[in-house]
Image (spheres, rainbow, N blue to C red):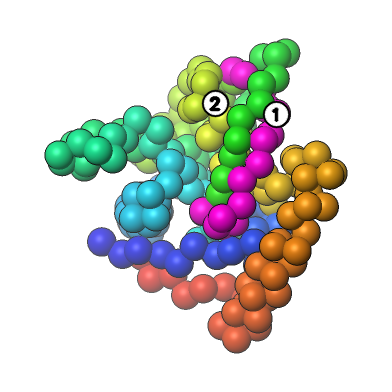
């Protein structure tokens, strides 16, 4: 199975809004499989298409995996969200320390709604509505932000962002240099 390159902070595609998917065919199924493989290989719990250079409204999530299980793949419970939209959220927010595969080595406390209801389509393009709370709600909101060109560091308090400015600036410069060398979109053969 193909692994995709995860693009880092500073790459312009991370700031773009992804486009709706009109149908699921073999290309989209291959993209879902490659995104899942990439997320698991990076030891992540969520991955949005923007993070692998694809501007389509899709993300994958697995908050239930047991990395310490003798056979880690048996504990996987991949969830696919196509064209997701939060249709309801709790009035209560809660803090949680977030990180991101596209911003390695950086973490910060972000306040988000404690519970949500989301409408989306699954890997077969069937519509569904789901309620989520705790870690699942957090990851869904984080990945949906990616599809809208928003990063978790944008949601940090101004003081924390200022403290991270040096690290983020270096990451941005490195990512832009790579972008200029490789071109605007990574070739994705799925």
Q: CA distance from mark 2 to mark 1?
A: 12 Å
User: Is the N terminus in the top left, top right, bottom left or bottom right quadrant?
Assistant: bottom left
User: Is the C terminus in the top left, top right, bottom left or bottom right quadrant?
Assistant: bottom left
Give the residues drawn in magenta, as a range.
Answer: 101-115
Which residue is at the far front? 163
Residue 183 visible in this rendered orientation of the protein: no
Residue 121, position as x, y percentages in the image: 47, 34
Say which residue appears at 41% left-offset and 64% top-offset: 4
Say which residue appears at 61% left-offset and 46% top-offset: 107
* Residue 116 in the figure: left or right of residue 5: right
Please give the count of numbered marks on the rendered protein. Answer: 2
Q: Residues within 10 Å of mark 2 (few under 14, many from 20)?
A: some
Residue 183, position as x, y percentages in the image: 60, 81
Q: Is residue 108 magenta?
A: yes
Residue 188 visible in this rendered orientation of the protein: yes
Say which residue appears at 15% left-offset and 41% top-offset: 71
According to the image, label 1 marks what residue? Answer: 111
Q: Is residue 41 magenta?
A: no
According to the image, label 2 marks what residue? Answer: 137
Q: Foreground mark, 2 or 1?
A: 1
Front position in the image: 72 or 17: 72
Q: Earlier in the sequence, mark 2 or mark 1?
A: 1
Above-or-below relation of 28 to 138: below
Front position in the image: 91 or 120: 91
Residue 145, position as x, y percentages in the image: 65, 42
* Residue 55 in the figure: left or right of residue 63: right
* Residue 46 in the figure: left or right of residue 84: left
**Of helix, strand and loop, which one carries label 2?**
helix
Instruction: Give the quarter of the image for residue 174.
Output: bottom right
């Amino acid at each position: 199975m193909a692994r995709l390159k995860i693009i880092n902070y500073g790459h312009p595609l991370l700031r773009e809004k992804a486009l709706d998917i009109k149908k699921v065919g073999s290309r989209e199924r291959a993209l879902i499989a490659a995104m899942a493989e990439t997320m698991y290989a990076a030891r992540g719990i969520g991955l949005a298409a923007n993070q692998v250079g694809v501007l389509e409204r899709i993300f994958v999530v697995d908050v239930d995996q047991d990395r310490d299980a003798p056979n880690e793949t048996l504990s996987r419970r991949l969830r696919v969200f196509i064209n997701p939209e939060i249709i309801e959220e709790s009035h209560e927010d809660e803090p949680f320390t977030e990180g991101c595969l596209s911003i390695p080595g950086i973490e910060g406390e972000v306040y988000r709604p404690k519970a949500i209801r989301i409408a989306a389509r699954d890997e077969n393009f069937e519509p569904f509505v789901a309620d989520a709370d705790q870690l699942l709600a957090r990851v869904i909101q984080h990945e949906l932000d990616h599809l809208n060109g928003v990063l978790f560091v944008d949601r940090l308090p101004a003081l924390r962002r200022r403290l991270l400015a040096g690290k983020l600036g270096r990451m941005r410069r490195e990512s832009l240099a790579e972008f200029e060398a490789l071109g605007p979109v990574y070739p994705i053969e799925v």
